[in-house]
Image: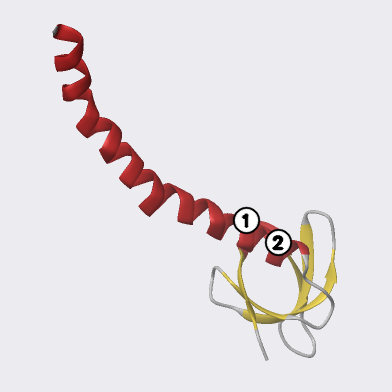
């Protein structure tokens, strides 16, 4: 009799965790995978927006950094961690 009460009291927690997983954790993991794939696929000439809001053009993707062109004269290196998104033409 007490095992039934224990399972009945534990059931709402299990249901709550399942709802939390499917509404929050799983979509966030999917978004992280898409973002990592986008960063790995960056090529010369792609336009990106950094997490600081700079719009720049990729000059040379490297292992940990990406060389980007801010304007005709300025080329800088930024960490791959700070690429927010790619601008689609």
Residue contact between numbered discs 1 and 2, judged by CB atoms under 8 Å: yes
Viewer-nearest residue: 36 or 67 = 36
Q: Give the image quarter of residue 82.
A: bottom right
Q: Is residue 38 left or right of residue 58?
A: left
Asked if 7 appears above or below 3 in the picture, the reply is below
Can you identify the residue that label 2 sits on?
37
Can you identify the residue that label 1 sits on?
33
Q: Give the image quarter of residue 12.
A: top left
Position of the N terminus by quadrant: top left
Q: Residues within 10 Å of mark 1 (few under 14, many from 20)?
A: few
> Picture coordinates of residue 80 (x, y %)?
70, 60
Viewer-nearest residue: 21 or 15 = 15
Viewer-nearest residue: 89 or 1 = 1
> Picture coordinates of residue 73 (x, y %)?
80, 87
Mark 2 secondary-structure assignment: helix
Viewer-nearest residue: 65 or 25 = 25
Question: Could you tell me which residue is drawn at 83 percent across and 55 percent down?
Answer: 63
Question: Could you tell me which residue is drawn at 29 percent across and 32 percent down?
Answer: 14
> Picture coordinates of residue 21 (x, y %)?
39, 44
Question: Could you tell me which residue is drawn at 48 percent across and 54 percent down?
Answer: 28
Asked if 79 appears above or below 88 in the picture, the reply is above
Mark 1 secondary-structure assignment: helix
Asked if 83 appears above or below 73 in the picture, the reply is above
Q: Is residue 58 left or right of residue 24?
A: right
């Amino acid at each position: 009799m007490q095992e039934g009460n224990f399972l009945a009291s534990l059931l709402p927690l299990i249901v709550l965790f399942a709802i939390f997983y499917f509404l929050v954790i799983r979509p966030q993991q999917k978004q992280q995978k898409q973002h990592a794939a986008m960063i790995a696929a960056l090529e010369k000439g792609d336009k990106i927006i950094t997490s600081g809001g700079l719009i720049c053009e990729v000059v040379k993707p490297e292992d940990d950094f990406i060389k980007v062109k801010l304007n005709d004269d300025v080329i800088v290196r930024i960490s791959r961690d700070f690429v927010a998104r790619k601008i689609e033409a």
